[in-house]
Image (cartoon, rainbow, N blue to C red):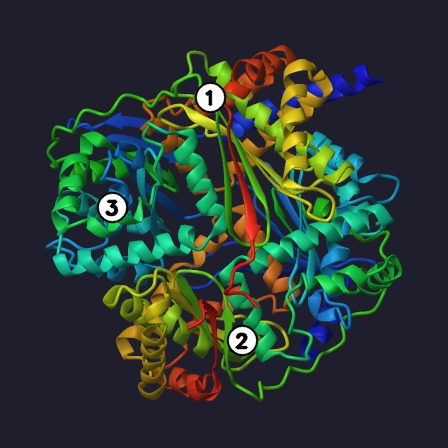
Amino acid sequence: MCVFLKKRFLFQGLGMLCLLYSQSYAVNLPIQHWITQKQTPVYFINTPRTPAILDVRIGFYAGSSKDDQTPGLAYLCNQLLREGSGEYSSEQIADQLAEHAAQLYLEVQPDFGLVGLRTLSHESVREPNIQLMRTLISKPQFKEEDIGRLKQQGYAALQQQEQTPESLADQHVYSTLYAKTPYAHTPLGKKSALELIDRAQLVSFFEKYYTAKNAVIVMTGPISLERAKIISEQLTQDLPLGAAPAAEEPLPDNKRPQRTHIPYPSQQSHLRLADVAISRKSPDFYALKVGNYILGGSPFSSRLFKTIRDEHGLSYAIHSYFNLLSRRGPFVISLQTQHHRTEEALQLTRSVLNDFIQKGPTEEEVRSAKKGILGALPLQFSSNQDTVQQLFMLAIEQLPLDYFEKLPQNIQNVSQEQIQKAFKKHVIPEHLSTIVVGPSA
Amino acid sequence: MWMYRWLCLTALCVSLISVAEAAGRSPYYEATLPNGLNVILKEDHRSPTLVVQVWYHVGSSYEGPHETGLSHALEHMMFGGTPQYPSQSFSQALLPIGAYYNAETSHDHTCFFTQLSKEYLPLVLKLEADRMQHLVFDPAFVKKEMAVVMEERRLRTEDNIQAKAYEQFQALGMKGTGYEHPVVGWMADLESYQTADLKRWYQHWYHPNNATLVIVGDLSVNNSMALIRQYFGPIAQQAVPTTTPPVVLPERRNHTLDIKVPGKLPLLFMGYPTPSIKTTADTREAYTLELISSVLAGGPEARLHRHWVTQNPLAAEIHCYYSLYQRGDTLFTLSGIPNTQRASLEDLEKAMKKEIEDLKNVPITEEELQKHKIQYIADKVFEQDSLSTQAKNIGFLKTLGLNHKEIEHMPKEIQSITPADIQKIAKKYFKDSSLTLIRLYPESSSDEE
């Protein structure tokens, strides 16, 4: 983390150009990078051939991991940003967005909160939309009646989760692996905590985390570099300086792997095998990325898919993934099956995993996986929306500017032995927790 | 003051239309091969990728009793392999080049799509042409894949309270039409299928004269057409079963059903039979219904949301759906989840019905209508960002037997709709006597803590 913070200050005041381009996996989109006067890092890709669409995202290190003792605080604060800001009421904001043909979206994840805008790049609507976005991120009203109303929407969303077995299963992955840490709860938190949040807490959270030095901005669209720089200054003009995000310790291993059963009246059992794993900063990231593609990441051809779905028809959706949270996210295998075949599915899944870890992937699998991952790269930049998403990931995770440029080589460099070693180190089958959501036995 | 605002909004709308038209106006090329295959190519040179979609003109609305779910099941079987490309070689061929592929079945079509780097166009065309003719039906694969289809049904419907309620809503509101049963099919039918049933479905429907090929992206027309003729040209056309006539809903059908299931949240579905763009005598009616959907629940500024989620929060969520691109008549649908801290399902029902009455009785202002036109047209511009969406829009229209260029006329058509149109259409179609209504009441189950 510290290394990247230093790099950011080095670039201050300079226009930093970096190409997404390498070998035959050419994605020829230059990333421009600079810091605003208020010290917010900005990343911009000019996409001249897109229809006249400008995508802007502002991310703040204001995720649910900052909730501290009040689960749901980051979520509620973020949702309230469009409900009354500056001199505009909730309704006026909605009207303005509609009249200027804009789409606004808000999101909170454990590591960040984001405010996103999709606008036509034509000046007549772009300008008022940017001005509105500037107000929304800096002058929320946090009116009592809006707080009350949004809490109630939150309760409904929580109830929705409670009647969705997949959501219950995912929730319990985090509450099991990360108990008593900032990753234990999902952004919505729980009703009993949401109920207690008051205006003072929201204001305090906002003032602490929605600041210039705690933010990143990304933009993609058919605008000039000069225009992008102006927009970045406009957006950050009213933000307080604040403090840059502090380095955070990775979270510890889960001390008590366990099997949890959550009763639910469904025909299927929803299953998760999971353990605390890595962040993207791990030196084994590339090896695990390629390995996971082979084990359960590639749709249709992964080992888990071929055995559990193709061979045995046990599950419709089965996959494995590393959720690359900044303080060490989980490794998860996810599937669902008819209730009475739960044990069979779990045993089979574990045997595929064990085999993979003990023997590692084959040369052919490694070769194929690399081609698959790299061949898909251009698809990730084939629309403005895809491009802004990739750029946002680079920005919020403070990845080096040449991350995409170096990605093909980093993937190519991964060896069969490295994959086996990395999996042996980071995924220990006996240490995985098992979560089952379904009818009682 | 309002006049000034209205003028500004109108001006914006007009300039948006030209933006939308410019965005949509990239070179199209259209052809029909001698064997009947429809081909539409659209150039978009933003990135060196292509989206290739094969649309078969068959979906769940073509299925009769005890045939439900066959189209979707066949979609699964299409990955079972051919003599030249045995099972899994489809993925073996496509995954190493990083292609993203999948398929989707709906009421009126089955679509197989691939997104990939442009230099692999010959490969995907070869694979698609091959499985259009030579699909193998290995009984072991069929049996296993039917098990997967049943798991899919369990995941998406059986264990999903709201999806299950929606299924019952469709069954009630579209009774006696091809839209009565779900795309995935009824479980009893799925359990009964043999290899022969799937093979028969394939032999009936999967022919070039019953298909449309759409390619959008960094293509060259000449090069693409040469490849298409090479791979698809030799496939013989075959007779296709007579298509059932478009599903037409009788005027009067008022249905109400209360459901109690284990769950946490109440839910309401309301549906009014309306024409689609295909079955309407006047496309203006269909576009008016599109705008009405936007006026009611297009976004936070829309009526249902503004009145009942923001101002007087009886609702936690409200949605509106209108299927413009459908082969037959459709159900204009509203759904709502009450804010249980303040209101009951009955309160929400009353509020939503009142909104419908207001739409019929009180003319909408030009200003409010203009706001929705802007949002709607802008959405069409945003859609152009995605190669897949561009291709889908073409595919939807073409498989309905409509001119795919209809998309380009849409902004002007939308702009021409008046407050009088809105009232007229609302009065014509949103009648109590034709309403289908489902109320879902949650109850706690013995399997919960």
Q: Amino acid at mark 1?
A: Thr
The image shows residue A141 at horizontal and vertical percentages of 86, 48
Horizontally, residue B33 falls left or right of residue B329, namely left
Do marks 1 and 3 both belong to one polypeptide chain?
yes
Task: Tell me if label 2 and label 1 are in contact, CB under 8 Å.
Answer: no
The image shows residue A435 at horizontal and vertical percentages of 48, 74
Which residue lies at the image location 30% right of the left edge and 54% below the top edge? B149
- Regarding mark 1 in the picture, which secondary structure is present there? strand
Determine which residue is flagged by label 1. B274
The subunit letter for the residue under badge 2 reads A
- Callout 2 crowding tier (Cα within 10 Å): few <14, some 14–19, many ≥20: many
Which residue lies at the image location 70% right of the left edge and 70% below the top edge? A65
The subunit letter for the residue under badge 1 reads B
Determine which residue is flagged by label 2. A330
Task: Tell me if label 3 and label 2 are in contact, CB under 8 Å.
Answer: no
Image quadrant in which you'd find residue B72: top left
Do marks 3 and 2 both belong to one polypeptide chain?
no
